[in-house]
Image (cartoon, helix red, strand yellow):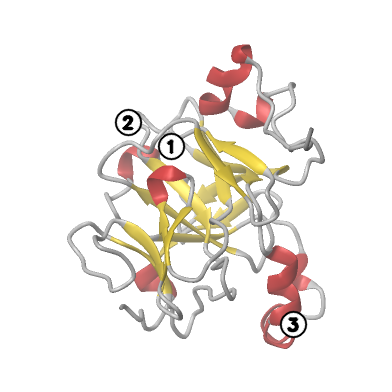
Amino acid sequence: MERRNFLRLSATSAMAVAVAPSLITQKLYAEDGSLFQTFEKVQLKDSEGNPMKSATLIEEENYVFNYPHAATPAIMVNLLSPANKDVKLKAEDGTEYVFRGGIGAKGTIVAYSAICAHQLTYPQKSMSMFQYVPTTGKTLAYEHAGVFVCTSHLAAYDPKQGGKVLGGPAKQGLASIILEIDADDNIWAVAVLGPNKFQEFFDAFKQDLKAEYGRRGAKKLVKTEAVVKTLKNYSAEIIQA
């Protein structure tokens, strides 16, 4: 029988996933450990150093922060309706994993790596060709908005289904950034779920990242806090399609 890698999660830990993934002691990763990786528990803060609160997130706004590395961008969105729960996904190599859903009072808050799974397009300070398109917007990448879109080659991803590919040339979905909300409503990033493109990203943009972050700065892991900005304040120009 063909051996497959499945995300393993006991019934007793399922609720813990939604509440506090970093506290789980059971396995929460594929058999080889490649699709779920914990990192430092990092608090999300605004540009003035104030903790980001889940209750203050504007619906369908693009919130950009770097995690888990100093140069790897992620986008957090408070969706209009809850993300789907227990979505089964598959990486390009066939490895299967499960997206457990959004967080927050309504299960509407999600975050994903903002590195396109196709050809690594990502939000830059000069411009961004990767973004979440609000439901009131329009996109050529998919039949309706409310999706993540890379305007380089019109790849579209579903934020409600764990970053699943909806259209375009991408062969796998986006890596999900696992978030927690503490008792004071502060938001923390704690792990990455799904096939990430971090190493390919570092290799492809080595010279650009070196110029911005120094020789080894791009790969440094974020340790305690990550600054969050809206995409419109992060990138000088946003390219839409």
Relative image position of residue 64 (x, y in whole percent): 47, 62
Quote the CA–CA distance across marks 2 and 3. Answer: 40 Å
Q: Secondary structure at mark 3?
A: helix
Q: Amino acid at mark 1?
A: Gly
Give yes or no for contact between labels 2 and 3 (Cβ–Cβ under 8 Å). no
Answer with left or right where residue 77 lies relative to residue 8.
left
User: In terms of sequence position, does the residue under pointer 2 or pointer 3 come before the other?
Assistant: 2
Give yes or no for contact between labels 1 and 3 (Cβ–Cβ under 8 Å). no
Kindly indicate the quadrant of the structure image that contains residue 209: bottom right
Q: Secondary structure at mark 2?
A: loop
- Per the rendering, the mark at residue 206 is 3
Most distant residue in the top direction? 12
Residue 151 visible here: yes
Judging by the rendered image, the residue that carries numbered circle 2 is: 106
Answer with left or right where residue 203 lies relative to residue 109.
right
Up the image or down, 57 lies above or below 167; here it is: above
Q: Residue at x 27, y 39 (%)?
A: 81
Relative image position of residue 190 (x, y in whole percent): 63, 41
Relative image position of residue 121 (x, y in whole percent): 54, 76
Q: Residue at x 40, y 74 (%)?
A: 154
Relative image position of residue 197 (x, y in whole percent): 67, 64
Q: Residue at x 32, y 38 (%)?
A: 55
- Per the rendering, the mark at residue 203 is none
Judging by the rendered image, the residue that carries numbered circle 1 is: 102
Residue 61 visible here: no
**Quarter the N terminus occupies:** top right
Quote the CA–CA distance across marks 2 and 1. Answer: 8 Å
**Quarter the C terminus occupies:** bottom left
User: In terms of sequence position, does the residue under pointer 1 or pointer 3 come before the other?
Assistant: 1
Give yes or no for contact between labels 2 and 1 (Cβ–Cβ under 8 Å). yes
